[in-house]
Amino acid sequence: MVVSAALLIRERGAHATAISDVLKHSGAPRGSAYHYFPGGRGQLLEEAIDFAGQYVAGKIAAAPNAMRLLDDLVAHYREELIRSDYRAGCPVVAVTVEAGDPDSPDRTTKLIERAAAAFSSWTSLIGQRLVAEGVSESRAEEMAMLVMTSLEGAIIVSRATRDVKPLDLVQRQLRELLQAEISERKP
């Protein structure tokens, strides 16, 4: 159900993802939602964001180097955008953009905290990869933020324009920047 929730959120957004949709998508019996998620829809959304954060973190951590990290992430998002007819974006972004319900500030705060943790994890992992390739910690932190935010922005623009060109352009520019940064640090 958590995976189904994350998949639905990335295509529909959090507000449009109901427990009944998740049950239908996952094939889980209705009673299982109440059993596994006593905190209701809010708990399910929180766990879906945690799952999405860990999923992308795993992709980042598995990359053998910074260039492959970038290329693998772009290839994954590119494939998902095309496969879903440009409906699939990032569930963490979807939750972040939709957060801010004044009627449920506690639930909103929990979701934003989870989204912030995912973004922080991704940025940290990218930065660690760059440091391992000789980039200074302060510069790696800056480059990691640039990579993460550029990719997320390109995904959003690609969805809006129904074209992967923004993602491809960002990949090319980031590749050049990363290559220059890494080459500059090598003896």
Image (cartoon, helix red, strand yellow):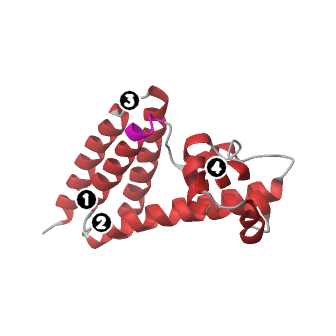
Marks 1 and 2: in contact by CB < 8 Å?
yes
Q: Which residue is mark 2?
A: 63
Residue 18 location (% of width, % of height): 72, 48
At label 2, which amino acid type do we have? Ala
What residue lies at 51% left-to-right and 48% top-to-bottom? Answer: 90
Looking at the image, is mark 2 or mark 1 earlier in the sequence?
Answer: 2
Residue 170 location (% of width, % of height): 33, 40
What span is colored magenta in the figure?
A: 81-86
Q: Which residue is mark 4?
A: 95
Give whichever of 130, 37 is nearer the camera.
37
Crowd band around label 2 with a 10 angstrom C-alpha radius: few (<14), some (14–19), many (20+): some
Seen from this angle, which residue lies furthest right? 103
Q: Which residue is mark 3?
A: 163
At label 4, which amino acid type do we have? Val
Cα separation between marks 1 and 3:
23 Å
Marks 4 and 2: in contact by CB < 8 Å?
no
Cα separation between marks 2 and 4:
26 Å
Q: Which residue is mark 1?
A: 68
Seen from this angle, which residue lies furthest left? 187
Check residue 132 in the rendering and tell me which mark sits there, or answer none: none
At label 1, which amino acid type do we have? Arg
- On the rendered image, what quadrant is the N terminus found in? bottom right
Looking at the image, is mark 2 or mark 4 earlier in the sequence?
Answer: 2
Under circle 3, the secondary element is: loop
- On the rendered image, what quadrant is the C terminus found in? bottom left
Under circle 4, the secondary element is: helix
Q: Is residue 121 above or below residue 172?
A: below
Cα separation between marks 4 and 1:
28 Å
Residue 131 sits inside the magenta stretch:
no
At label 3, which amino acid type do we have? Asp
Residue 84 sits inside the magenta stretch:
yes
From where the camera sits, is residue 123 visible?
no
